[in-house]
Amino acid sequence: MDPVERLANLLEARASAVAFTGAGISTESGIPDFRSPGGVWARNAPVMYDDFVRDRRERVRFWKMRRELYPLIRDARPNDGHRALARLEAAGVLGGVITQNIDGLHQAAGSRRVLELHGTARRVACIGCGREWPPEEIIARLNAGDDAPDCEECGAPLKSKTVSFGQPMPEGVMAESVELARAAGVFLAIGSSLVVEPAASLPRVAAYGGAALVIINNASTPLDEMAELLIREPIGATLSRLQAYVERGRPAPG
């Protein structure tokens, strides 16, 4: 049987599904995988959070990389994979999306319950008082020569609302993600290498809780042996076909 049809049957047989997405779902929108050869982190060592806080030179380096990255995120649009997941949620098949991505494309596609494990690049916040800005305002300050912007209210450094290396994960988001994974009947791991912890623990949590683990990725992962189904096909086309299978077998909502 076609693997996408097998997945559609699996979704029909199980009560609830959760999607877990990594960089692979957004490459079709033109956002490169930061860890891939030639990616941002292959050319620049990431800035550790403690270094960002205490060393202005590291803040300058951080914002130089963000200035390079932001136009890619600003101009990106959801692709077929993002849209298919939003449609599956609207149809009541998907209970939510847990994502490692910082690009906001799931929300732009119409997904309503999106848990951003690594934060978002679509907001900037003061690490002192918490005041927030749209990134366009801070990019304008960078372009005007402010290479490490500080808060105009309290003087503390500004940082994109992304989780840097060495920075604690948002506890509420992680706890809700674990809860969602434990309740899943099917756990779809999509476009993730499944090596970055603690996010990579979530497929294990789901599988140990009885979920069928399905991995859709173009390369092998450390959890392939745990998977009930492996699909090595383009993500956008795969999820679009899945959506079509599911919608043919279900009445339209409303």
Image: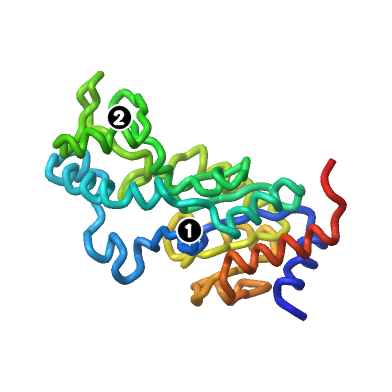
Residue 60 image point, x, y percent: 16, 43
In the visual, does 51 lie left or right of 132? left
On the rendered image, what quadrant is the N terminus found in? bottom right
Residue 252, relative to residue 157: is it above or below?
A: below
* Amino acid residing under circle 2: Cys
Q: Helix or strand or loop: what does disc 2 sit on?
A: strand
In the visual, does 180 lie left or right of 168? right
Residue 39 image point, x, y percent: 31, 64
In the visual, does 143 lie left or right of 31? left
The residue at 75%/52% (across/down) is 93
* Amino acid residing under circle 1: Ser
> Residue pushed farthest bottom?
1
The residue at 76%/48% (across/down) is 92
The residue at 46%/62% (across/down) is 27
Query: Foreground mark, 1 or 2?
Result: 1
Residue 184, relative to residue 134: is it above or below?
A: below
Q: Helix or strand or loop: what does disc 1 sit on?
A: helix
Q: Tell me, yes or no, whether the two marked residues, 1 and 2, touch with CB atoms within 8 Å.
A: no
Q: Which mark is residue 86?
A: none
| Residue on which the image places disc 2 | 126
Label 1 CA crowd tier, 10 Å (few <14, some 14–19, many 20+): many
- Quarter occupied by residue 126: top left
Residue 156, relative to residue 7: is it above or below?
A: above
Q: Which mark is residue 29?
A: 1
Residue 181 appears anywhere in the view: yes
On the rendered image, what quadrant is the C terminus found in? top right
Residue 221 image point, x, y percent: 50, 73
The residue at 25%/19% (across/down) is 153
Which of 161/167 is in front? 161
Q: Earlier in the sequence, mark 1 or mark 2?
A: 1
Residue 8, relative to residue 154: is it above or below?
A: below
